[in-house]
Amino acid sequence: MSDRFEKVYVHPSQFPDQVFHDYLTGFAAGKINHKFHYDSVKQSQKWLKIHETFSPARQDETCIDAYDKCFQKTAEIILNNDSLNLIGLGCGGGEKDKLLVSHLCNHQRTLSYYPVDVSLSLAIISAQKVKGAFPDLQVQPIVCDLLQSDDLISLIENKKRKSIITFFGMIPNFSPDEILPILNSFLAPGDLLLFSANLAPGNDYLTGIEKILPQYNNELTKEWLITILLDAGVERKDGSIKFTIEDDSQNGKLKRIAAYFELEKNVRLILEEEVIEWQKGEVVRLFFSYRYTTPMIQDLLHSYGIDIVAYTEGANQEEGVYLCQKL
Ligand SMILES: C[S@@+](CC[C@H](N)C(=O)[O-])C[C@H]1O[C@@H](n2cnc3c(N)ncnc32)[C@H](O)[C@@H]1O
């Protein structure tokens, strides 16, 4: 086969039947699964623009530096490992993984990079970005839904190698009780987990969340989040998107920013054979993003036997980068 083809592995969790089932389930429950905000090329491009505009990791030099320091430390720890798997879970546009590869790649080491994402578009963008910078690197993009792929690591070749797993900016968009057991099962003793979380800056948790709310409550983000509804046949005049700060139902201490589409009209959608009826006054959950503090992250990881070896954050305290290892 010509190397002009990009070979992408698709896990069964993203086979069409499963994806359509998840899509209908979300519409029927009035709770849209986050993965549907990154699905199409149009959505992934809108998200990349938001990320470029608001993410401290793109806009703030001290935050980029925090990642760089964490990656230097990682390179020191794996100095004597001559073969490694780098598995980028929810790789997005691949910028952070690319910076990490620049610290790991050398002529003595065999390194394979697996950009993993629910979005085909983002998995390919990451693969091509990293391959473009490091043409000799072995790169294999994978498409999967992490919430339904607990066998992912066992399906990857070279699983006897030590792995570095990245999980950057992912924890806010999942319920911790759902994703942590899966992430934990991916780690073998000795593997490294590089993890970053969006934090509530300052000393007061709620005030910190209120401070960063405008990074979500803005037109670019609303346009991104409404795309899935418009594509399904909802009209702009059917309602409007409102942001709120709410408590987590499982863990009262934890809060998240959530976006709801508040219906100002009755809506009837026909999605293949399924009829979805939403009434005026109801709300459809489009998105949430949990905000953490470093002690919260520490406790959470510790409860799964994952230890933070090193930690850095940007000057504005909006993003923490954690180098972790399974105890
Ligand atoms: C907030 S972005 C973070 C991207 C990147 N890691 C970064 O830090 O820039 C979330 C990423 O997770 C992916 N994603 C969302 N839900 C997912 C799921 N269920 N399984 C796998 N990837 C998912 C999205 O496509 C997106 O690339």
Image (cartoon, rainbow, N blue to C red):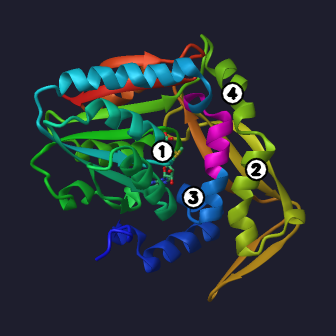
Q: Quote the CA–CA distance across marks 2 and 1.
A: 22 Å
Q: Quote the CA–CA distance across marks 1 and 4.
A: 20 Å
- The residue located at (57%, 58%) in the rendering is 38
Q: Which residue is mark 1?
A: 175
Q: Quote the CA–CA distance across marks 4 and 3.
A: 22 Å
Q: Is residue 198 above or below residue 95?
A: above
Across and down, in percent, residue 309 comes to 27, 19
Q: Is residue 282 left or right of 86 when viewed as pictured?
A: right
Quarter of the figure that contains the C terminus: top left
Across and down, in percent, residue 136 comes to 26, 49
Q: Which one is earlier in the sequence, the residue at label 1 or at label 4?
A: 1
Q: Which residue is mark 4?
A: 212
The answer to whether the residue labelled 2 contacts the one labelled 3, judged by CB atoms less than 8 Å apart, is: no
Amino acid type indicated by mark 4: Ile
50 in magenta:
yes
Q: Which one is earlier in the sequence, the residue at label 4 or at label 2?
A: 4
Amino acid type indicated by mark 1: Ser
Q: Quote the CA–CA distance across marks 3 and 1.
A: 18 Å
User: Could you say which is closer to the camera, residue 66 or residue 32?
Assistant: 66
Q: Which residue is mark 3?
A: 38
Q: Is mark 2 within 8 Å of ligand 1?
A: no
Amino acid type indicated by mark 3: Tyr
Q: Which one is earlier in the sequence, the residue at label 4 or at label 3?
A: 3
Q: Which residue is mark 2?
A: 222
Q: How many marks?
A: 4
Choose top left, top right, bottom left or bottom right for residue 305: top left
Q: Is mark 3 within 8 Å of ligand 1?
A: yes
Query: Which stretch appears magenta?
Result: 47-57
